[in-house]
Image (cartoon, helix red, strand yellow):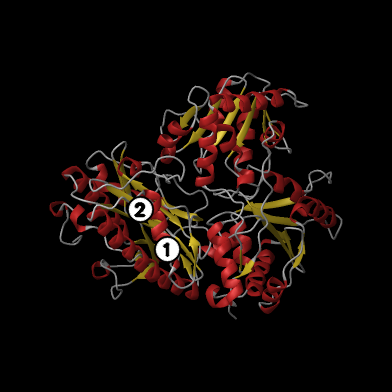
Amino acid sequence: MGYNNTVKHRLSKVIRTGVDSYTTSNAAKLTTNSTVQGSSMTLQRLTALRALMTSQPTALAAYIIPTADAHNSEYIASVDARREWISGFTGSAGTAVVTAAHALVWTDGRYYTQFEKETDNTLWTLMKMSLPETLTMEKWLTANLVEGSVVGADPKTMSRDEWTPLQTALKKAKMELIAVPNNLVDQVRVQTKDGPPKRPHNGIIPLPVKYTGKAAGKKIEELRDKMKEKKASALVITALDEVAYTLNLRGSDIQYNPVFFSYLVITMDSAKLFWGDGTLSQIVVDHLNSEGATIECRPYDNIMEYLNELAKELSESGDGAHGIWLSNDASEAIHRASAGEKVLKKPLDLISEVSPVALAKLIKNEVELQGFRNCHIKDGIAVVRFFKWLHEEIGKGSKVTEIQAADRLLEFRTEEEDFLGPSFETIAGAGENGAIIHYSPSKGGEQRVIRVDDMFLLDSGGQYRDGTTDITRTRHMGEPSPGQKDTFTRVLKGQIMLGSAVFPQGVKGNVLDSFARQYLWLAGLDYAHGTGHGVGHCLNVHEGPSGVSWRPYPNDPGLRPKQILSNEPGYYKVGEYGIRHEDLVEIISITKESDHPRARGLLGDFEGRGALGFSTLTLVPHQKDCLDLNLLDDFEV
């Protein structure tokens, strides 16, 4: 099976352009708009929201606005960018809380500088999550609201794992958390004549088994086997990348993430896809049939009604002991509908835990692994060509802006086979902009020119049919200072230490995090982000449930061979420069005979657990001119 030219063109176009989807660039335009109109616009929005909070059937003392959609996606479409609209803050992570007197945003260290630049600090307060003295949202609410207060949130925008602890904490403080099904920010947008855009339902495209390595029908069959083990009557799949993975389909409803808004419900005798208006193209129908997947398609908006019907049907059949299996990351609204809380006196039992699809796609098959290796060769060629071009242009005195650099890199990648588009918005930070961890240059306003005295940080990636890439390289355009060489080398030493580590199979990723920080810590330095994340196969560039971070991943099942992670320590001197070195790595089993730099030193295999290490996939060199060789030992060299 293969793509015809028309399908290839459509897939490349929709993933590259991300029709009607949310991006940092779009967000930057919105923020620029807000800045031009002044803080009065932000105040107007907050005032309207507060009025709506007090007019609810039960008046709300606080309203929670997460950065989330109904699928717990990390990156969201513009229709779901509610926290950004109300606050002006465009970072990809953060939760806003609005009360009668306060407006706050909790976010992590990647976004502190960005928050201060983008929001009206007379109206909004930054809650720095990375600092130990910062109260959590739960503790702030219980400390600042009076007994009897009611807190509201849209249950579609919070997972059960987020909802339940907050509900418990408020209850202990004699407060209440209630579900507000009609999102208040959406209502305010309509009132202020700035209604949210329509939810995108762009075309779905098949990804053939020659890229995925396993037919959709086989994946569904394996899920049903797991359902039998769990004694589950139905499996509700809500994460967009899990639906795409299971059916070997890709979309473009969220820019850079080849996914489509949908739900998939699997029972022992049916599989129902909730998407768009409930009509699939003939190309998709033929693809599913060819892969042995019998799928009934229903309209996307019918999911809650169907789950209520399914709950009633299951409660009335047999002995009524039917479990519904769904991810603990699924929304509170989906949990309630799956249990039939509105239609049953005794709601159904739920099996709410890490999704079996998340665990399945975490371990790549041999076709996917070979695809990752292949696409990194292509991606490495594109990135090396780009840096050669950039150094030549800067060297001869040409003015190259950050935006022009990002666009030129895209041109080089576009020339590679099976390239579909970027895997996230390119972070091209020159000088002081490199210190903004998730910086992306805006096409509006004055453009930052990359100068010969700049440290330049480039974090970018590509979506290819055979895999996904994510690479960061930092290069000085001229002569680095001794301090820049020192920190550049310390970051690289940490990346080498992690990349060459040997560890027991099953250990959780957070155990490895300090390896990457070791040489920065020795100098009293650090970075305010995790060290590694999982990566999807022609899917989301950030994939759970495993990762490497100072903060444990809650559902990390332990590291196993055939997982793909990033290895990306960094250092950021605010106002001056940023450094990050990022490779993607494949987890491999190691014996004394393995092709691994530490293999010869092995004396055991952790008492039968098995020894693991990393094989680096990324194929782009580091800049030797930025190295302080006196800091490197022979092994590192």
Pick the residue in front: 97 or 167. 97
Q: Quadrant of residue 551?
A: top left
Q: Which residue is mark 2?
A: 458
Residue 501 visible? The answer is no
Q: Amino acid at mark 2?
A: Leu
The circle on residue 274 is: none
Label total for image:
2
- Work out which residue is located at the far bottom of the displayed protein and give it: 1
The circle on residue 411 is: 1
456 vs 334, left or right, is left
Percent coordinates x, y for residue 105 in the rendering: 52, 32
Percent coordinates x, y for residue 419 in the rendering: 48, 68
Q: Residues within 10 Å of mark 1 (few under 14, many from 20)?
A: few
Q: Amino acid at mark 1?
A: Glu
Q: Residues within 10 Å of mark 2 (few under 14, many from 20)?
A: many
Q: Earlier in the sequence, mark 2 or mark 1?
A: 1
State the quadrant of the C terminus: bottom left
Going 53% across and 74% down the picture, which residue do you hit? 211
Percent coordinates x, y for residue 61 in the rendering: 66, 23
- Cα separation, mark 2 vs mark 1, equals 15 Å
Going 68% across and 64% down the picture, which residue do you hit? 227
